[in-house]
Image (cartoon, helix red, strand yellow):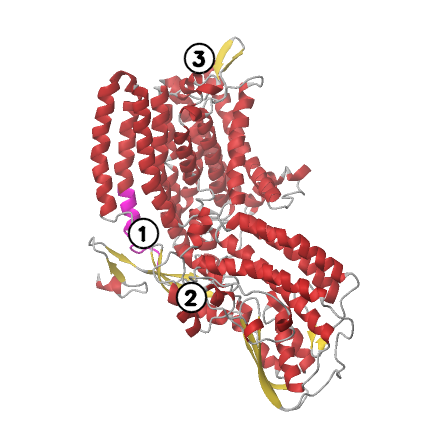
């Protein structure tokens, strides 16, 4: 371990982090643009060409806003909650490989921040930290809408985490490893993609992922028609922005992990690997936005019933069937 | 060891730095208005809140949390099994059947006892 | 334990499992995204479940009725616009209908046709706003923009006719304020041809969507008897299965000359109220077409003096607005100003029946039911 290695790691980390944040920012632009097109509007047009500078304008606006915290909030928890949403959301990208490796200055550089041998477990552990932020925000705000949104959201997220975990077990069964880099290497051709090996697992993963990221039709925590803004009702200024960025970072991470687990990661013909990776993740993002423009929202008990009484049994059954097929 | 975990710790530091930096920026750049009674009240649709929020909340939500622990641990147990499943083969499958069977009893029990009922 | 029971929050609830939890109060409204104006519902909640709901009204009181006592009849008409801003044409009409009845004014045939065209177009516009917000309350954001897009066409038609897009002041005592502009008939027919297939579009987005069905089917059932007892009217009553439409049952204007159906629901759930309004839009299109076909030439307004004085008398007139029975009770003492004007809106009854049917439902259902009642607050508070 020499200092050049450390520099390389540092550069990799900073670049990936910057790309992730930039991705979040322009993801909001993409969402506004696409939803606008679905709804026969134009979306943001004024800031830059086709409103491309809108995310920057939004950030400046958020920074200049007054940071209000109401009376009787639990100051410490109230201030920490946005950070607790933001940090884990950016962490799980660390184990996702976004390319094979490049030769630079005679050195062999893997295009992954950390080739962790327990990659999947790390992802599960880090993503489940997000629920703390929501519970913290909901409880500390001292507002009933926040409380209801926070508790609701916490229950929803932990419920769908089980399905998420079970769908990933199937992938582990298929590939026999929990290392994401090896998983990608195993899906070298399109026929070996895990999505074809077990489409049910992907379906479960995707439904759970949408629920985990609190997106439509599972966007109950922030269902504005019922709970105004859910757990971040009381937040303003950059604290609100932090939740926002955290949510979008989560979406990108979930898309990146789905790409890695089910769609052969960065692999693809003709184009450079990193580009393939971006294309696949972007496809997920577009799908997210599409559902938002199309579907109504579930009711809370319907959501919980679906998670516990449909997804859980199906996911367990799927694990057993996959194991049985593999035995053959 | 160092080469796999150092980048993650570094990413964590970068993330904390970015988050803290944004906090500080908004603290310096943000507008400040004089103290106001109405600014301080929590949002409850424009009227004075009735009652307190720090009260006992329905127990159903906590039941979900407890159930989650049970089933999530089940899922975590499945990971090592799934990794070495090639070597365990039939023995592993039967073992898992037994394991899931036990959990199934618990699952049926919680369904019967109405822990997942919402009204 | 005792002091908790006596606290401002609700009662302790003992569950079978031996855990005690507590009800808590939530103010939904006046400033809430889904109370459609400034209605305030004081909810007693047990977690997600609504235990009781108490409507509070009066946030939008503008004393329209009192002001009317100091205005001449012609001056009151613009006030009635504010009575229900989503269907101002109907407000104008119901007031004029009463004045015409007391003063016994003969309305030209052309004016009657124009009134029907305007009110039915306004009914479509009102239902479109309803559909937009209803879908939005269920979390579907796209129908909102679609509906408002079509509403713009109707607004354009109104603007070309009377210069206003929301508060028309168009229907006057004895007729309408001005004749239809040149080319209105053609533009109106174009709109109807354009609009009819779009209703199918909305239905594609919602009617058979499983999530939409699970959110609306058998939710918030309003039994027929309860609806009648509370004086509920309009699409909400028809959704509960009673075929009661003032256009047919207490006909006014030229409605008896037109051929149209009255759609009704079966069980009276949220979905029935939805489908009744969707079908009503189709029927309204039919009526407008017939009115355009039969539009005669002639005067658009009977000759009456601007400061006319109706005879001494009183009368109650009612018409079918987009929300239900809209009534005006006018007492005239023979001067240029009425002694008393009382306006009746149906939203009040709709809001008051809400507590009867929300017990034990989830807060999301409450939002859906409230939206399906299509209550708007200016009509309640006046």
Residue C95, relative to residue C86: is it above or below? below
Residue range corresponding to the magenta coloring? B52-66
Tell me the residue that label 3 is attached to: A2
Q: Chain of mark 2?
A: C
Q: Which mark is drawn over residue B118?
A: 1
Secondary structure beneath dot 2 equals helix
CA distance for labels 1 and 3: 59 Å
Tags 2 and 1 on a common chain: no
Q: Nearer the viewer, residue B70 or C25?
A: B70
Q: Which image quarter is the C terminus of chain C in?
A: bottom right
The x, y position of residue C282, in whole percent, is 59, 59
Q: How many marks?
A: 3
| Residue C201 higher or lower than C360, as above or below | above
Q: Residue at x 60, y 51 (%)?
A: C145
Q: Which residue is mark 2?
A: C354
Which residue is depicted at the point 32% across and 20% down? A326
């Amino acid at each position: 371990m020499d200092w050049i290695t450390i520099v390389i790691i540092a550069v990799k980390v900073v670049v990936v982090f910057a790309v992730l944040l930039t991705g979040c920012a322009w993801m909001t632009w993409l969402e506004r643009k696409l939803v606008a097109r679905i709804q026969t509007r134009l979306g943001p047009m004024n800031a830059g060409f086709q409103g491309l500078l809108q995310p920057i304008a939004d950030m400046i606006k958020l920074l200049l806003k007054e940071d209000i915290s109401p009376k009787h909030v639990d100051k410490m928890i109230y201030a920490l909650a946005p950070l607790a949403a933001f940090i884990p959301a950016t962490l799980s990208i660390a184990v996702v490989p976004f390319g094979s490796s490049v030769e630079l200055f005679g050195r062999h550089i893997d295009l992954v921040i950390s080739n962790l041998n327990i990659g999947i477990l790390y992802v599960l552990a880090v993503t489940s930290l997000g629920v703390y932020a929501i519970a913290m925000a909901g409880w500390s705000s001292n507002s009933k809408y926040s409380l209801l949104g926070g508790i609701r959201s916490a229950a929803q997220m932990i419920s769908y985490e089980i399905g998420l975990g079970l769908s990933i077990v199937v992938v582990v069964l298929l590939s026999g490893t929990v290392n994401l880099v090896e998983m990608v290497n195993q899906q070298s051709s399109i026929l070996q993609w895990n999505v074809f090996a077990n489409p049910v697992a992907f379906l479960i993963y995707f439904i759970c992922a949408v629920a985990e990221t609190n997106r439509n039709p599972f966007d109950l925590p922030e269902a504005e028609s019922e709970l105004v803004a859910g757990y971040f009702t009381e937040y303003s200024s950059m604290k609100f922005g932090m939740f926002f960025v955290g949510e979008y970072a989560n979406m990108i991470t979930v898309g990146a992990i789905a790409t890695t687990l089910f769609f052969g990661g960065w692999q693809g013909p003709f184009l450079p690997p990193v580009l393939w990776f971006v294309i696949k993740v972007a496809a997920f993002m577009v799908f997210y936005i599409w559902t938002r423009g199309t579907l109504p929202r579930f009711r809370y008990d319907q959501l919980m019933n679906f998670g516990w009484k449909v997804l859980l049994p199906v996911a367990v059954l799927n694990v057993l069937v996959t194991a049985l097929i593999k035995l053959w | 060891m160092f080469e796999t975990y150092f980048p993650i710790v570094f990413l964590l530091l970068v993330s904390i730095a970015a988050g803290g930096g944004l906090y500080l920026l908004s603290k310096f750049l943000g507008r400040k208005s004089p103290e106001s009674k109405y600014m301080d009240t929590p949002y409850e649709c424009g009227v004075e809140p009735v009652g307190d929020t720090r009260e006992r909340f329905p127990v159903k939500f906590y039941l979900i949390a407890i159930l989650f622990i049970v089933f999530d641990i089940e899922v975590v147990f499945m990971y090592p099994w799934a990794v070495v499943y090639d070597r365990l083969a039939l023995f592993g499958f039967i073992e898992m059947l037994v394991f899931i069977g036990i959990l199934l009893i618990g699952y049926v029990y919680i369904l019967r006892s109405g822990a997942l009922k919402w009204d | 334990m005792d002091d908790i029971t006596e606290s401002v929050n609700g009662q302790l609830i003992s569950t079978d499992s031996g855990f005690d939890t507590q009800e808590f109060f939530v103010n939904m409204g006046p400033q809430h995204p889904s109370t459609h104006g400034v209605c305030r519902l004081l909810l007693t909640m047990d977690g997600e479940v609504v235990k009781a709901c108490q409507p509070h009204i009066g946030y939008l009181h503008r004393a329209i009725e009192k002001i009317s006592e100091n205005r001449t009849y012609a001056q009151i008409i613009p006030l009635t616009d504010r009575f229900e801003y989503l269907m101002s044409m109907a407000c104008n009409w119901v007031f004029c209908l009463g004045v015409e009845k007391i003063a016994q004014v003969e309305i030209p045939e052309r004016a009657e046709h124009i009134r029907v065209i305007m009110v039915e177009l306004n009914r479509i516009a009102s239902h479109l706003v309803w559909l937009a917000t209803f879908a939005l309350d269920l979390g579907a954001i796209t129908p909102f923009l679609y509906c408002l897009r079509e509403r713009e066409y109707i607004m354009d038609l109104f603007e070309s006719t009377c210069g206003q897009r929301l508060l028309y002041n168009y229907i006057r005592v004895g007729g309408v304020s001005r004749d239809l502009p040149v080319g209105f008939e053609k533009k109106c027919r174009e709109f109807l041809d354009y609009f009819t297939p779009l209703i199918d579009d909305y239905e594609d987005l919602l009617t058979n969507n499983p999530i939409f069905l699970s959110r609306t089917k058998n939710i918030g059932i309003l039994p027929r008897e309860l609806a009648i007892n509370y004086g509920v009217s309009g699409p909400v009553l028809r959704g509960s299965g009673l075929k009661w439409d003032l256009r047919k049952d207490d006909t006014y204007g030229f409605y008896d000359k037109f051929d149209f159906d009255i759609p009704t629901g079966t069980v009276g759930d949220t979905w029935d109220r939805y489908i009744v309004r969707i079908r009503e839009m189709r029927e309204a299109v039919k009526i407008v077409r017939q009115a355009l076909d039969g539009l005669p030439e002639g005067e658009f307004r009977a000759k009456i003096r601007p400061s006319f004085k109706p005879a001494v008398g009183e009368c109650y007139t009612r018409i079918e607005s987009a929300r239900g029975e809209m009534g005006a009770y006018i007492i005239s003492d023979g001067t240029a100003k009425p002694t008393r004007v009382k306006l009746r809106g149906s939203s009040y009854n709709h809001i008051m029946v809400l507590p009867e049917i929300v017990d034990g439902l989830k807060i999301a259902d409450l939002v859906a039911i409230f939206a399906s009642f299509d209550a708007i607050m200016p009509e309640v508070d006046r």
